Amino acid sequence: MSELVRMEDVSFAYANSRSPVLQGINIHVNYAEFVGIVGPSGTGKSTLLRLMSGLLKPTKGRVLFRGEPLNGPNPRISMMFQSPTLLPWLTVIENVTLPLKARRDLTEEEKKELGMRFLDLTGLSGYERAYPRELSGGMQQRVALARALVSLPDLLLLDEPFSNLDPLTALALIREIEHMWYDSSLPPASVVLVSHNVDEIVQLSDRILVLKGRPATVVAEVKVELERPRVRRSPEFLNIVDEVIVLMGN
Ligand SMILES: Nc1ncnc2c1ncn2[C@@H]1O[C@H](COP(=O)(O)OP(=O)(O)O)[C@@H](O)[C@H]1O
Ligand SMILES: [Mg+2]
C-alpha cells in the first residue's frame, strides 16, 4: 500500500515552552485510508495535525507528503477545525468557494459549480445565499466541511469537528461522513480524524493511533475491521471502544 503522509521521528516544542509536546512520532497514512488519532485533551493532537498540514514545522524530524518534505501549507491538504471559522460577511456559497478564489485554472462558473456540488453533498442545497449567522451550529460545520472538500484535496485533516455540536447533530454528521467515505463520494484520498471521543473514532477509522504521555508519543495502534456502516451498540464495536479506552488509560 502506498503512503500519502509520513512523519519521521518528529518532535515538537512550542517556542515559549521548555518541554516538548510531542516526541519521537513515527506514523504514516496510506492512500485511501481513514486514520483516527485519539488521546486525552491537551496531549498534542491539534499540534500533531498542524504539523501534518504544514502549519507548524517540526523541532526535530520531518514530515513527508507524497514522498516530498512538506514545507508549509499545501493546497492538496485541507483542514477542518472544532469551530466552523466561517466569514460572517460572506454568504454560504462564497464561504465554500473561498479556497478556490485564487485559482486561475477554473472559471467563476466552474468554481460555483464545485461549491454547489459540495453544498449538495453536505446536505445544504438551498442555503447557498444564506449568511452563517442564519444557520445552526451543525449546519455551519457542514459549510466548513464543504469548504474543506471544494479544492478536492488528497488529504483531509479533521480536528475534533464534532465536539462543539450537540450529540444528535454530531451523530448525524458522523454517519454522513461514514456514508460518503464508503460510497466513495468523499473526494480526499485519505482522512485523518483527531478526537478525544473514542466512539466517533471507532465509528470512522480503519486504523486508530493512541497518543499519550508528556511529551506525547503513539503508544498503540488498533486496526478496525468492522463492516460499514458500523453499528454502535454491537458487541464487536463496544469491544474495540473498550480496548482503546484501556490503551488510553494505561
Ligand atoms: N500556541 C501554543 N503555545 C504554547 N503551548 C501550546 C500552544 N498550543 C498548545 N500548546 C500546549 O501544547 C499542549 C498540547 O496542545 P494541543 O495540541 O492543543 O492538545 P490537544 O489537541 O490534544 O488537546 C498543551 O499542553 C497546550 O497547552
Ligand atoms: Mg485539540
Image (cartoon, rainbow, N blue to C red):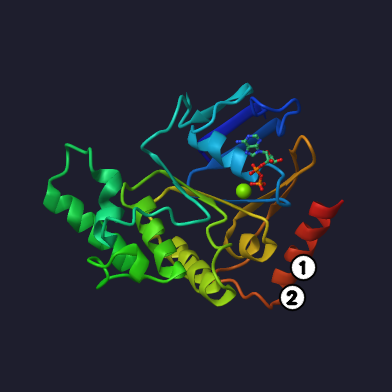
Residue 74 pos. (x, y %): 40, 33
| Residue 33 visible in image | no
Residue at position x 48%, y 44% in the image: 31
Task: Give the structural element (helix, strand or loop) at label 1.
Answer: helix
Task: Give the structural element (helix, strand or loop) at label 2.
Answer: helix
Q: Label 2 sits on what residue type? A: Pro
Task: Decide: few, some or many residues near mark 2? Use Cα within 10 Å; few <14, some 14-19, many ≥20.
Answer: few
Residue 204 pos. (x, y %): 57, 61
Tag count:
2
Task: Decide: few, some or many residues near mark 1? Use Cα within 10 Å; few <14, some 14-19, many ≥20.
Answer: few
**Is label 1 in contact with label 2 (beta carbons under 8 Å)?**
yes
Task: Identify the residue position indicated by label 1 in the image.
Answer: 239
Task: Identify the residue position indicated by label 2 in the image.
Answer: 235
In which of the image's four quarters is ligand 1 placed? Answer: top right
Q: Is residue 119 above or below residue 8?
A: below
Residue at position x 17%, y 36% in the image: 104
Q: State the mark number for residue 177.
A: none
Q: Label 1 sits on what residue type? A: Asn
Residue 221 pos. (x, y %): 72, 48
Mark 1 within 8 Å of ligand 1, using the beta carbon: no
